[in-house]
Amino acid sequence: MGYRVAVVGATGEVGRTFLKVLEEREFPVEELELFASERSEGLEMSFRGERVRVQALNKRDSFSGIDIALFSAGSSISREYAPKFASEGAVVIDNSSAWRLEPDVPLVVPEVNPEDVKEHKGIIANPNCSTIQMLVALKPIYDAVGISAVVVSTYQSVSGAGAKAIKELLEQTKAWCEGGEIPQAVSLPKRIAFNAIPQIDVFTEQGYTKEELKMLNETRKILHDPHIRVSATCVRVPVFYGHSEAISLQLKGELLPEEARELLRGAKGVVVVDEPDKKEYPLPVDVEGRDEVFVGRIRKDLVFEPGLSLWVVADNIRKGAATNAVQIAELLLQYAMV
């Protein structure tokens, strides 16, 4: 049996990766419809050796007959169009922040809370990229001994800010190497080449950015644990693809580093690379294009007792966005909900 699948925001970085992941995972697409803004109307994109024409989203009156719609077109588009797709029978899997904290919208990481998919009412939210990879790594530990607090610092690639930020890093790096004047930042708050920017999104009254508070609020919702504490510092770094995270955990029960390694080695979607003596640990350049979450530097934390510290890396465009969404779609098929 095949399904009629729509991709909204098809020409963007995540939209293009949706197509790759659908093809690689052999998702049963019988008919594919691609949507973007008017300026992309008429472009053709490749899927399974065929060319599919991009439609202007705002020129379409009806979305009847679509089974699954994968959205990555920004919050405002999701707010306007996700309910329209859902009202005509589609299940929307949305990659924006628009629906993540809505009480009646499941927020799902398939390795962490797959059963929540069953509670959907037409829209399912894809979590923030940094939250996804963190929770894939932490869930086995959380289930084994419990976690009361998380302190995390992220090192987030420019692809998380879109194609314009990728171009900005390229142009600034080229100018620096050639000894020319470095172009001013446009899509990012500050120059990113050979720099680190401790701001992603805007600051809130608490002094945290929205991105940092997403990691707190989304973690609580996904784990169904309103009491877990999360303090995040999110930093943009001059890396094209792959987010990295340094995480310290306050545990509820004792768990030795070697025990944590064994737990994680047996966890779905996790790859342990942890031989620091041999300089073996996860790196963004090594995980690009991969769907797993990579964990290393697992050690006893020197502040929290009991506690652990670890290093977590994943491709933010794939597992942090497109792959996680397609895995949610696969859950819908598994539970016969579409």
Image (tube, rainbow, N blue to C red):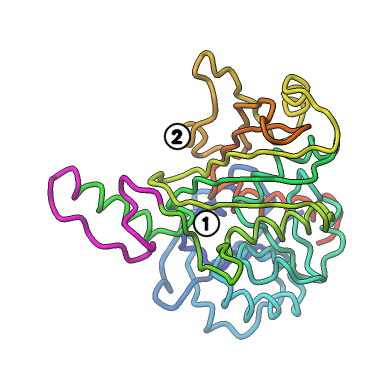
Residue for badge 2? 285
Specify the amino acid type for callout 2. Val
Type of amino acid at the residue the image marks with label 1:
Val
Image mark for residue 14 = 1
Give the left or right position of residue 281, taking residue 97 as reference.
left
**Secondary structure mostly seen in the magenta stretch:** loop
Q: Which mark is residue 230?
A: none
83 sits to left or right of 12? right
Mark 2 or mark 1, earlier in chain: 1
As drawn, 317 above or below 43: above
Vertical order, 258 against 55 (above or below): above
In this rendering, the label closer to the viewer, 2 or 1? 2
Q: Is residue 220 above or below residue 280?
A: below
Whether residue 2 is in magenta: the answer is no
SS class, disc 2? helix
Which span is picked out in magenta? Answer: 175-196
The percent coordinates of residue 37 (x first, y second) are 46, 75
